[in-house]
Image (cartoon, helix red, strand yellow):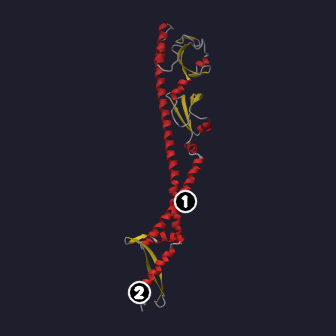
Amino acid sequence: MRIKTFSILFSLFVSLVFSVSPILFLVGSEAYSLNHQINELQRHFKEQLSHEDQWLSNINSKLDSIATNYQVCDHNQMSDMLDLEFSISAVAKMYIFDKQGDVICSNDILSPLAAHLSPEILSQPVSILGFNELILNTHYYPEKEIYLSWVVSKNYVRALNSINSPIPYEIARFYQQDELFSFGANPTNSKAMLTESTMVAQTTDPDNVAVLSYPSLKQLLLCRVSPLSFISMVFFSCVLAVLTLSSKRSSMLTQIWWGIQRKEFKYHLQPIVDMRDGHWIGAEALIRWYRNDSIFRRPDEFIPFAEHSGQVAEFNQLCMAMIEELPHKNNNPR
């Protein structure tokens, strides 16, 4: 009875494992794909910060050259500033301010930024000019007692740092712990998810920091594998398990029927002896399933199916036929 129960439970377990494997494969493959996409997002984020660092380094070296050679704002000086503007992408205009914040030279001929900016603004290396979403970058050169500023659009920085990724993300830019602006590919319904995982990177300037925020792998999995699809997969797996068990039962019953037709079942009589006097008082008929002169199936594998299907009656007929064929003589060992 224990062997029979174990066999049924083992068959059910194998069938369930086989039927649940599509769910495990779906979740596993989706988790692998999402993890790869997260790694790619992080890699692109680091690469773009590295490119920005090189871009800023190139700009700073050329600004240092202009400031070093600055004497008076003449045609040659403005020409050098225009050349720098054309040679470096995204640098819109450049301005030279004195210590009081007055513009003393600029390549912005048509629409000057302003005749004056407060020293408080100029003392900040990075400032936001809110009226036009411009970023003002300022360097102070004490040997010349001048501020050299250049303007870049936020849109250019966004384009420089944007990442083509299926993972929703947001990049926030900070300078000296003050948030300048943020951007990214984040649907409104995933805004709250972006706080789950973050990655911080900075350029060679330790005050210039970028923070990448994106959903956790668990949240992405919950979004990709929706509850409805998961329930559908569970239902499909249960149906598959039932069909697998039914198919196995049907297959076994068919094999038993063919085994009976081919006379593959044989009985062995195991004597029952009275230990008091050694007389045989009966025999137990043990059925075995042979194929090609070897045991094909163990009894615990096919007898439960035969009992439930009624085929055990045919086994009884085989047993009676074998007994009738036995020679009727006294086999008493005494």
- Residue indicated by mark 2: 327
Which of the pair 209/42 is nearer the observer? 42
Crowding at dot 2, Cα within 10 Å, few <14 / some 14-19 / many 20+, comes out as few
Which residue occupies the extreme top position in the image?
74
How many marks overall?
2
- Residue indicated by mark 1: 242
Which of the pair 196/13 is nearer the observer? 13
Between discs 2 and 1, the one toward the N terminus? 1
User: Disc 2 residue type?
Assistant: Pro
Q: CA distance from mark 2 to mark 1?
A: 48 Å
What residue do we see at 51% from left, 42% from top?
Answer: 34
User: Disc 1 residue type?
Assistant: Val
Disc 1 element: helix
Which of the pair 215/225 is nearer the observer? 225
Which of the pair 257/11 is nearer the observer? 257
Disc 2 element: loop
Q: Position of residue 60 (x, y in %)?
A: 48, 20
Classify 318 as above or below 76.
below
Which residue occupies the extreme left position in the image?
292
Residue 181 falls in image quadrant: top right
- Assess whether mark 1 and mark 2 are in contact (beta carbons under 8 angstroms): no
Circle nearer the viewer, 2 or 1: 2
Q: Position of residue 244 (x, y in %)?
A: 51, 59
Q: Position of residue 188 (x, y in %)?
A: 62, 35
Crowding at dot 1, Cα within 10 Å, few <14 / some 14-19 / many 20+, comes out as some
What residue do we see at 53% from left, 16% from top?
Answer: 93
Q: Position of residue 260 (x, y in %)?
A: 45, 72
Residue 254 visible in rendering:
yes
